[in-house]
Amino acid sequence: MATTNTPSVADRARPIAAGAAVVGAYFLADTAVLVLGDEALLFVAANGDPQRVVVHGGGILAAASDGERIVTGGDDGKVVATKADMTTATIAADPKHRWIDHVALAPDGTVGWSAGKDAFVQPRKGEPRKLEAPSTVGGLAFAPKGRRLAIAHYHGVTLWFPNAAEAIPERLEWKGSHLDVTFSPDGRYLVTAMQEPTLHGWRLVDGKHMRMSGYSAKVRAMAWTAGGKGLATSGAPQLIVWPFHGKDGPMGKEPHMLAPAEHQVSAVACHPQKDVIAAGYDNGLVLLVRTTDGAEVLARRPDGSPVSALAWNAKGTAIAFGTEEGEAGIVDLA
Amino acid sequence: MTDPITSDKVPVTVLTGYLGAGKTTLLNRILSEPHGQKYAVIVNEFGEIGIDNDLIVGADEEIFEMNNGCICCTVRGDLIRIIQGLMRRKGKFDAIIVETTGLADPAPVAQTFFVDPEIGRKAKLDAIITVADAKWLKDRLRDAPEAKNQIAFADVILVNKTDLVGAADLREIEARIRAINPYATLHLTQRCAVPLADVLHRNAFDLDRILDVEPKFLEAGDGHDHHHHDHADGHHHGHGGLKHYHDEDMQSLSLKTDRALDPDKFFPWIQNLVAQEGQNILRSKGILAFKDDPKRFAFQGVHMMLDGDHQRDWRDSEKRESRIIFIGRELPESMIRKGFEECAA
């Protein structure tokens, strides 16, 4: 647990007043980009003032990034891609102005999004494709190779090959409402966060179920550790990391429990190379946690506002964070 | 159990009512009044009906069962998604109004606010408003269980289109409603003409407020509370002469005792009761005096969900009396009475 003796890099943080709830954080090269709940992205270059770029005519509901661009979905019914040079391109506009609830990006640049029950993909070239899910889409994720889209919904997940129009989508079933969804980086496992405070997983080769429970809150943040060895999650008053390195993944295993605190973990981001995880808490605390020995470094002192966004840059030399109250910051660790 | 931060939660008003009763009329009336408030409106037939508001969201009325072994614990999955989305635009609106379809059961809507902690942290249920059609309500209470649920669940009931029925019919409708739900505030209206203060910011689900409205909500039987808003019709409505009906399947039950309760007996009893009978108990409320406890305890429930907390100290001038009410179907009255009596310290 963080104490006054915990080593700190908090004084190296550059505070940023984001002016609106921060709902996502990414790095495009060396520029930190905060996704704001109102309608804009806030570009924070290493030097110079933050620049606000309005990308939607309404609230931003979802965001994803591949390091080259940030794709956002808004309650204006649009899917917009924004590059590091702050230029934007509208990828799609829902004819009925429905909310774009979720977005996903594949390695080949294919963009996925959903509005209500409908999931869509837009390849780099060619026509968009649509699949109606059995109920409202709770989350989207492309498989690591990008050819398959996982669509989470009530009572399970649909796996869709958008390029194989005639193929019947595969259905993974499990009772309940499935929200966020993620593939393990090796593509062997699929994990969803549910409406209940629990995760559900499938081993894709045989459909074997994995129940990952014990949370005290709904899991809203999931991130794969360097090399895909573990899945770090929010949802408990400590950082929960499920082991995925063995033959059977987390089946029959206990998760690692790190950095206990009095408050719930609300955001997680894994260092791109090292065994270090940034954990944000719902009182505003941010800790850097080494998974090998549990050592902690203070990155932000608590101020009472839940940490709602966390990201590492690609080199692993800086983190960006933001809170529900619109406070943000960049910590340069180099 | 109650979040200490309540002041900045966005109030949510739920409008229910059978098809054609006048929900959309009420909604448009609320939106068109010069109240200076901005509302986010969640509707079902998105785009099909004329609603004059900047922020309108279409809902799908998706009912999700929770995986908690409780079959009546259902939530509105779409509402969770929409309210979370709206909360990203916090500050752009002052309150949320949810209009349900005519056939909707209010329970999943109400339970959403009990079950989802993130929604509960940011939004609070203000009241369930039910619009009933004066001309057709009696028939619907016979043939449509949804209509009966909506009356039973309501905090505020508008008996609308009163100009279409005579005075005697109106009294009968009131009596029918009171047989199901004697605790709701009743308004007789034409074209849903009702002061906004009577339908908005009611705090009907606020535990503190349960105490404020206590004399009203705990009055039993013919202690009805209604307000006319259709003075044009000229008929005078006498108090105290309401006919008593017994609804065959939906009743309310009011219990009280001046013997102090033992919390170690009461909590297991009420939890067991709602676990066993929760499907039939639509709503419950209570104010409790525990032995050697200077503070009043208030609770409320929707089906199997219970929420309760200590309130202020009992005043010296106050009678330390515990009172609870239930509204539900086929309530096992003698079993409930006996169980409650056995909770005495």
Image: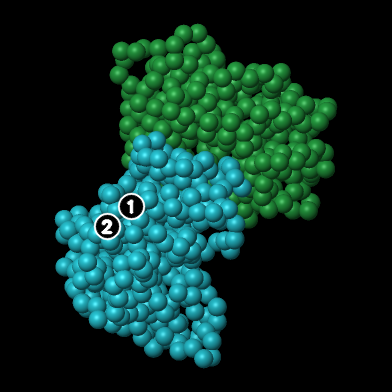
Q: Residue A47: name its quadrant.
A: top right
Identify the hue of chain B: cyan
Rendered position, A83 above or below A264: above
Q: Residue B270: name its quadrant.
A: bottom left
What x and y, as percent, mark residue B26?
A: 39, 53
Q: Residue B176: name its quadrant.
A: bottom left
Residue type at tag 2: Asp
Label 1 SS: loop
The chain in green: A
Q: In the rendered structure, the residue with mark 2 lies on which chain? A: B
Q: Which of the two discs, 1 and 2, labels the residue nearer the N terminus?
A: 1
Q: Which residue is at a point 32% across and 47% down the rendered structure image?
A: B101
**Which residue is identified by label 2?**
B133
Can residue B193 be seen in this snapshot?
yes
Which numbered dot is residue B22? 1
Q: Which residue is at a point 63% across and 20% down the rendered structure image?
A: A88
Q: Nearer the viewer, residue B41 or B74?
A: B41
Rendered position, B85 above or below B12: above
Q: Which residue is at a point 35% across and 29% down the rendered structure image?
A: A133
Q: Which residue is at a point 55% across and 82% down the rendered structure image?
A: B313
Q: Nearer the viewer, residue A257 or B97?
A: B97
What x and y, as percent, mark residue B304?
A: 34, 61
Residue A294 falls left or right of residue B78: right
Q: How is the image coloured?
A: by chain
Q: Residues within 10 Å of mark 2 (few under 14, many from 20)?
A: many
Q: Determine contact: label 1, label 2, CB under 8 Å.
A: yes
What x and y, as percent, mark residue B331?
A: 23, 70
- Residue that protrudes farthest toward the top in the picture: A125
